[in-house]
Amino acid sequence: MPEDKTIQELGLDEYKFGFSDPEEYFFKTPRKGIDAEIVAMISKHKNEPEWMLEYRLKALESFFAKPTPQWGGDLSELDFDEIYYYIRPMENQGRTWDDVPDDIKNTFEKLGIPQAERDTLAGVGAQYESEVVYHSLKEEWDKAGVVFMDMDSGLREHEDIVREYFGTIIPYDDNKFSALNSAVWSGGSFVYVPPGVHIDIPLQAYFRINAENMGQFERTLIIADEGSSVHYIEGCTAPTYTSNSLHSAVVELIAKPNARIRYSTIQNWSHNTYNLVTKRAVAEENATVEWVDGNLGSKLTMKYPAVYLMGEGARGEILSVAYAGDGQHQDAGGKVVHAAPNTSSLITSKSISRGTGRSTYRGLLKVHEGAVNSKSRVECDALLLDENARTDTYPYIEIEEKKVNTEHEATVSKVGEDQLFYLMSRGLSEEAAMAMVVNGFIEPIAKELPLEYAIELNRLIQLEMEGSVG
Amino acid sequence: MLKIEGLRAEIDGQEILKGLDLEVGKGEIHAIMGPNGSGKSTLSNVLMGHPRYEVTGGAVTFMGEDVFELEADERAKLGMFLAFQYPSEVPGVSVANFLRTAVNSVREEELSVMEMYRLLQEKMKIMQMDPKFAERYLNEGFSGGEKKRNEILQMLMLEPKLAIMDETDSGLDIDALQVVSKGVNELKGPEFSAVIITHYQRILRYIEPDHVHVMLDGRIVTSGGKDLALTLEDKGYDWVRQEFGSAA
């Protein structure tokens, strides 16, 4: 088709955020690879309390002891010795964007962060390599007692809270990648919302990898105290290199009674990034936790946000949308554990596969004995854009209680010739027609996002698809 | 305006159109009538460019352009429109959103949000549609009548130069048929031509054709004025087969 050529000429079919800055850093580990010396170096560099160093070293042992998972995606090309584990781009965190070096500031400008901060956010954190280079919280929320800072500052300024909760939702030995993160974590967010405080506009953290062979291991802990609410949004991009990068985060959420946390991710890593993330939340009595998880980028993503419904009446919701283009594997889904009576959950997964892309839904629904009158619904829909694309569904269900109501539904559909012809007969190009079908498919998830992010999600999918039809 | 010469087309290796000729002038309304299996729907799909049909012979020009050189969207931009017999469902895409994209695709200049809104309100009123209809997902869960009305709504929004209507009347009750016909008559004028493809004569009571053609076994076997439609209704398609079947 004639349109294809134009788009290729414009270069839009390539990953849009693949540019990189020169590497001029305050500190970078002297070598690739990981061992106790590197871990101690990171901890010392951060001037951490002794207990954190011990925690890191225990986690490192666990990382070495655990085999690389053989299920899920293909990790055979991921070489832990070929990764840099810590880079500190600048000496001190910026209080204003003017404190941030020009290269880095320009990168975040290109990603639209300062603009979003002015327009729509209650606070913003910008992480570049291993450290958060800029952080802000609007005065109104600061005065209300909200804490929103990078995790390292959280450990320094609120050591007692961090020590009480850190690693309690996701123990370091939960899996190989939580162990790795626990050993070398750096950056991420620490959020505390005091009782009864409702932050009505989102907090956002943005994660950017710049260096080649970089490993980014942010660590996030969000505590919403009784009756409070918060919406946290995470975005991520990286340059395109021929060698691999690794992003392995650990995110722990705690929703106290009657609290509500919504955590939204639009992950758009470059196609050379392994994205292996552990996310888990605990919802206490009548609390609500929602994960909105958009996976567009990366080479391989393995991520299954979880909600443990520990208190009566708690509710968990997971909305997952994945796009797997050529060479990508999105192994995503969600886990819900019902451990108290009258709890409810909903998992909605929408995946799109194109070319040699593969999307996998992997989910767990578990209802413990005694979690009477629990309700759960799992719905996963896959859309295939062409003949070669692949999708798989692995729904694991373990029910120990009889008095429950669970539903599971899965569909696979293909974009049909008739559907495309219909739209094209109304003047839409083949690409526009395909994009319209895809946008319609993810509409149930897009409408759950704030408008700007819904538009962004649609736009990113459109960008991924451009030049791919014909 | 539209010129079809010796058109041959097949689907899955089976020839359906076997040398069809037809010429439609500017401002003319043509009706093509024929029994089931005569190739009526194939003709409409081939004219609009459905990829499943293969054109094996003949030529079709629209406004002087060879339509086989054009993709379906390019034909639409040139002013061709097909009202589908079985329109596809597009879940998650609202009628309003779809129409906005479609209208802006065929127009040289984009309409503003406000202009689009007014245009849609105006056309929906003609089609006697509830404004809430615009928020529904395209054809999803629509009744047969709603789908047909929606097709005509799209036609009014896109203002084509040539509309091909593939059995738009089938399955409609009298009320719906009147509304649909009203929509078509709305566009009637020196700049609008239509090819109404139908099994029955009754839609022609509401939309008066200038020419009537009878199609049998992939060809037009006889043509005439609107009286031909009445003759057909009287004598039935068996008469056509007896009279013209040998030619096929």
Image: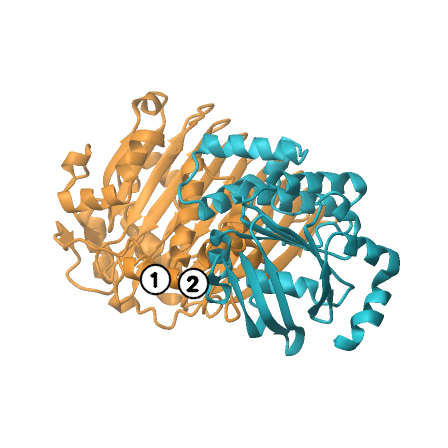
Chain colours: A orange, B cyan
Residue B220 rendering spot, x and y as whole percentages: 69, 67
**Residue B192, can we see it?**
yes
**Position of B235 relative to A134 (above/below):** below
Tell me, yes or no, whether the two marked residues, 1 and 2, touch with CB atoms within 8 Å.
yes
Subunit of label 1:
A
Alpha-carbon neighbours of circle 2 within 10 Å: few (<14), some, or many (≥20)? many
Structural distance between the alpha carbons of marks 1 and 2: 10 Å
Which residue was labeled with disc 1?
A271
Residue A314 at x, y percent in the picture: 59, 37
Q: Crowding at label 1, few (<14), some or many (≥20) Cα neighbours within 10 Å?
A: many
Kindly identify which numbered label has been placed on residue A325: 2
**Residue in front for this viewpoint, A470 or A15:** A470
Q: Amino acid at mark 2?
A: Gly
Q: Is residue A354 left or right of residue B194?
A: left
Please state the horizontal and vertical placement of residue A438, each as a whole percent of the image: 51, 53
Please, what secondary structure does the residue beneath circle 2 have?
A: loop
